[in-house]
Every structure is written in C-alpha cells, then in structure tokens.
Amino acid sequence: MPTLTVIVPATDGPVSLAECRAAIAAASQPAEEVLVIESPAGASPAEARNLGALRARSELLVFVDSDVLVHEDAFARVRAAFAADPELVAVFGSYDEASGDGGVVTAFRNLLLLEVHRQCAGAATTFWAGLGAVRGDAFRAAGGFDAERYRRASIEDIDLGARLSGSGGRIELDPRILGTHLKRWSLGSMIRTDLLDRGLPWMLLALRGRRLPAAMNLRWRHRLSALAAVLVTIGAAARRPRVLAAGVAGLLALNHRFYALLARRYGARTAIAGVGLHVVHHVTSAVAAVAAVVIHLGGRSR
C-alpha cells in the first residue's frame, strides 16, 4: 500500500486545529507522516501546502484543511484508490452530512458542496484540497499550488487540478472519502467567497485558457440552475409573477435532491431558506462571471 504524508495548512492559528489533528490520529491505516504547517504566520494555504510538500517523505500527499475532521476510514480509502489504479494521479472526497451543524447558511453552504460532489462522482478535471490526495511526483512536476497568484484561500486547488488533468493525469472524485467541516458561514462570508474568492478567479482561470467547461458546478445542470436563479431575481424585481414562478419551478426541478437533503437534515424551514440562498449563490456567481469577462477583455485590450 502507498505511504501517506498528511499536510495541514494552519498558518492562521485555527481554533479547530486540535480537533483536526485528533481525527487524523484516530484514523484507521494512519498516515506515516503528519505535517502541520504553522509558519510563516499568515502564509496562504497554497504556500503552506507547498512547504509541507517540500518536507514530505511519502509517496502520496494528502491535504486536509484545518477545519475538517476526517472520517476514520478516509485514509484507508485513499490508499485503496491509488493501490487499485497505478495511473491515478489524484483523488479527493467531500464533506459529510454533519457539516451543516451551525445555522441555516452553514447548512446550505456545506451541504451544497456535498451534493455537487455526489452528482459529479467519478472522473474529474479539477481537484479539492479540503480533503484530497495527489502523487508527490505528479504534484512536483505540475509545480505545486500557485502561491504567487493565489495569496489567500481561493481556487488554488482548482488551478492545480486543471494543470494535472491538462497534462494527461487521471483524477477521481470519490464522495465516500469524507470529512466533517467545522466552518461556520454567514450570509456576508458566503457572498464574499462566491464573488471574490471563487467565482471571479474561477472564471478568469477559464478565460486564460485553462478549459473547465464541464468541471463540477460548471456542468450544464448547474448552468441551468443559475439561469433559473436569474429568472427568479428578474421576476421578483420586475414584479412578473410568471417569470418568478418559472424560475422557482426550474430551481426545484433541478435541485430537488439537494432541497430534500436540507429538509431531511434540518427541516422544511431550512429547505425553504435554502432555495433563497441558492438564488443568492447563483446570482453572485453570475455577477462574478460578468466581472471576469470585463476584466479579461480589459486586460487583452491593454
């Protein structure tokens, strides 16, 4: 079985670090090496992970965010995936259903990632560093995370995945590799992340030539869901009930499994609020996409 080095970026003094380390230590088939990168203080997650990769002595690099509690079998599943497929370059998992404990926005945000990962299970063209593993030699050949471009938590993992898959590497999304996410979200932090840390840099990455037309929540199902959210916004703003109803019907049809998950875990009120938060999420991402096009075209003209 391949050897593992777990790398945890913790340069911002995370309060959840002790819980994260305890979960790593309690895992079955524990890692041969655990590196918690706490300095230099204030370094970006990309830089911290790169520093850990430089020190690692194992065949596989397993990245775990400091606010994620890995399940007991997570590392066993990672080992099994690479042992079964010598051509596999990277594998990543997802949050579990317990990641929504902490308010309506937290439930929506964390369980949305779980649902997207479930829908996109299998071959992938991206990567996720919340709980993901990559072969050390492939990581170094790709140049690691781009710490110059991404100087705070952003899409440095998506960028890495695009480079790995672009060079012919095979990446797998296995939603059975699970961790509990402890992060608490507010409406403001969700909008800020969707606009500045995810949506805008993701679209700029695509516009620069790193093709991501069907990666994760850029698949057609999610694009149609975004269109439905825009219709809801237009219908509400213009007081056009038919347009509003069409948008809501589209959201319900395309995302009924996700809303059912919210209802099952946290009740009908949270599910109803989730529809509204979904509209905010999609519209914010649409604004980010438009802004990215403007920035990209402005840069090309200059």
Image: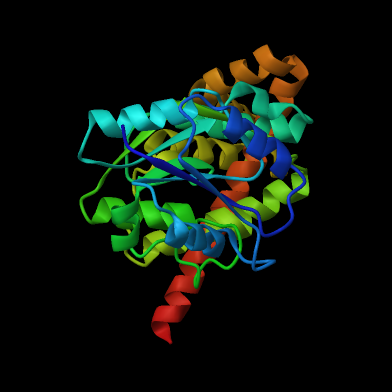
- Residue 130, x across and y down, in percent: 54, 43
Q: Residue at x 37, y 51 (%)?
A: 161
Quadrant of the rendered structure where residue 272 is?
Answer: top right
Q: Residue at x 69, y 66 (%)?
A: 41
Quarter that holds the C terminus: bottom left
| 184 sits left or right of 144 in the view | right
Task: Give the mark count.
Answer: 0
| Res. 270 visible in picture | yes
Q: Nearer the viewer, residue 152 or 115?
A: 152
| 2 sits left or right of 67 in the view | left
Q: Residue furthest top?
A: 264
Q: Residue at x 50, y 73 (%)?
A: 148
Quarter that holds the N terminus: top left
| 220 sits left or right of 259 in the view | left
| Res. 240 visible in picture | no
Please say if 176 is above or below 39: above
The colour scheme used to paint the residues is rainbow
Quadrant of the rendered structure where residue 24 is?
Answer: top right
Q: Nearer the viewer, residue 251 or 88?
A: 88
- Residue 68, x across and y down, in percent: 62, 37
Q: Nearer the viewer, residue 289 or 37?
A: 37
Q: Nearer the viewer, residue 91 or 25?
A: 25
- Residue 13, x across and y down, in percent: 74, 55
- Residue 193, x across and y down, in percent: 64, 53
Please say if 73 is above or below 11: above
Q: Residue furthest bottom?
A: 302
Please say if 79 is above or below 193: above
Q: Residue at x 28, y 50 (%)?
A: 165
Quadrant of the rendered structure where residue 119 is?
Answer: top left
